[in-house]
Amino acid sequence: MLQRFLNTPEEFVNDQRANEVIASQIICPGHMALEEYCELGSMSVGGPIRWANLISQLAMPGVDFRKLDTLLIVQQCIYQTGPVSETHSPLRRTHCLLEQLSVALSVIHGLTAALQRHRENWESVHALNAFVVIATRVISLNVEAREAGFAFLRDARHVAIEWVKLLREKAYISDNAEDRMEFVSKSVEIALVCALTFEVDYQDVEEALHSPNDAAVLFWSSIVVQEGGHILKTADPHVQRLNLRLQRLLDRSSCRLLSLQSGIDTAINLIWSSYEPRDLVWTPISPHANHWMEVTYPSSYEQAGSMQLHFNILTGQLLVNGIPLEQAPVDYRSHPLFKLLFTESLVEVMPATKPGFKFSTKRPFYGYQVELVMRHDNLIVCATHHRSVYHIISSDALRGSLPKHFVDDYVLWYNLETKQVQLRPSDEPWNSKSTKIWTLSRSQGSLTWRLQRGQSSLLGVESKAAQLIARIFRPLADPCQIHSILERNEKVLRIEIPDLHLEFSIVTGCR
């Protein structure tokens, strides 16, 4: 429906196009309001005032910049060549207005205001894309507006980075496959838009990629896109075109990126949480393949060996010991403890640097850096949060010593520093603040262990008191189904049989 307005023949005057828009309202698409249809159709009206129309829409939008239709119309308006200028200007007649610095700056100011309206909504990816292409076009057409234009692109880049991080976190913790796919797809599209904030004319590449931090953003964006490569195969044509533009950008910027190779470390740190930039020197693997960079990354632990990292600056592919970052092997993912801890979340792993472990998560999981290893069909998980290091193991180790509920519905977190074991509920194993946590610790001056939660202590199934209580309640429940809890502050022994919703109490001193 809107295709007819994408091209404005030279012989058309403003009034003719405006009249055509009004006369064609009968074919307005059903998903679009008449007012928006007229505004979109009028954006491409008449040569020199096209940029004035755009400034007006940025200030008081009558169109929805979040829609792909609007993006395509905007791109056609700003990139369409148009007839030669009568004033012999180097700019075509359609874009002569941008020769005035005040007009160019008005566009940038309008973009800044519009970005503020959309910066908290990651669903405005098409709006961000439109704002970015407008800014890069202004920089191309007016040299004096370059500084303001680059400042806007940096702001847009920051917004895109925050959106991608948010969506990757949502995808990481989501246990719904469809939602996860949607989050990954959107994060890839936004990463493409983020990368295209560097898509400027060749003579401006050095200004756009001014520092290693700028290069780090482009490297990081390309890594995000490369990791979501499976999404691009079935993505919309619009997204596939963005990817082609990214490939062209990386190729024409490769020489500049090679001079800013320290940005690779920063980019990797953004997607691999345990990676520590150490001023390592990345070098091309050969003069004939200088787009592949390599470095030897030493482990933080003396017992562990170093890792060989490879990074392709043209594709964003990162290899660790020749292996791409991906999900854990099937035998890990199918283990009951893995399913309990990570449910259906997307867990990407890479070779571990900590001695004794085979894999580590690429990103923190609920704030914990996680290492994994399989030993004799048993999954061992190490979780590190700040300076606290835990080994997570299945509660089956306590089967026969504690009631069934504390074995089946809890996960053991062993603190290597305090030598205490936390029993965290299996429905929230990563919540260290849960009020349901029990702590198993060794009694002072004794070889026995005590399971406590506040002033409550649970009697072990094999203790004499628990065995006596089990004999009394044997007609009602098995010993492993009875909870004998001593409330020290109230001097009360509570006896619970959860399966039957029964509770009894014995008060000290009562007969």
Image (cartoon, helix red, strand yellow):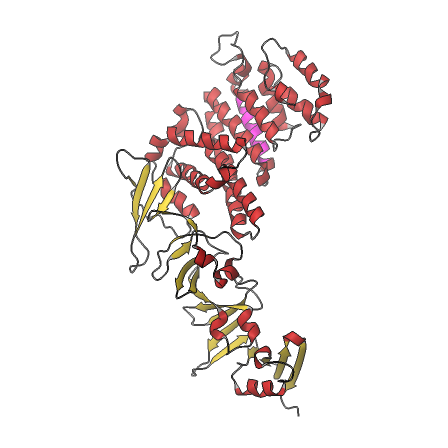
Residue 55 appears left or right of 369: right
Q: Position of residue 35 (x, y in %)?
A: 71, 26
| Quarter of the figure that contains the C terminus | bottom right
Q: Residue at x 61, y 32 (%)?
A: 67
Q: Is residue 405 above or below residue 336?
A: below
Residue 132 appears left or right of 217: right
Q: Is residue 382 above or below residue 234?
A: below
Q: Residue at x 63, y 26 (%)?
A: 57
Residue nearest the observer in this picture, 187 or 472: 472
Q: Which residues are magenta?
A: 104-116
Q: Residue at x 51, y 57 (%)?
A: 342
Residue 365 appears left or right of 427: left
Magenta stretch secondary structure, dominant: helix
User: Is any atom of residue 83 visible in this view?
Assistant: yes
| Quarter of the figure that contains the N terminus | top right
Q: Position of residue 123 (x, y in %)?
A: 59, 39
Q: Is residue 386 magenta?
A: no
Residue 371 placement: quadrant: bottom left
Residue 129 placement: quadrant: top right
Q: Count numbered badges in the picture.
A: 0
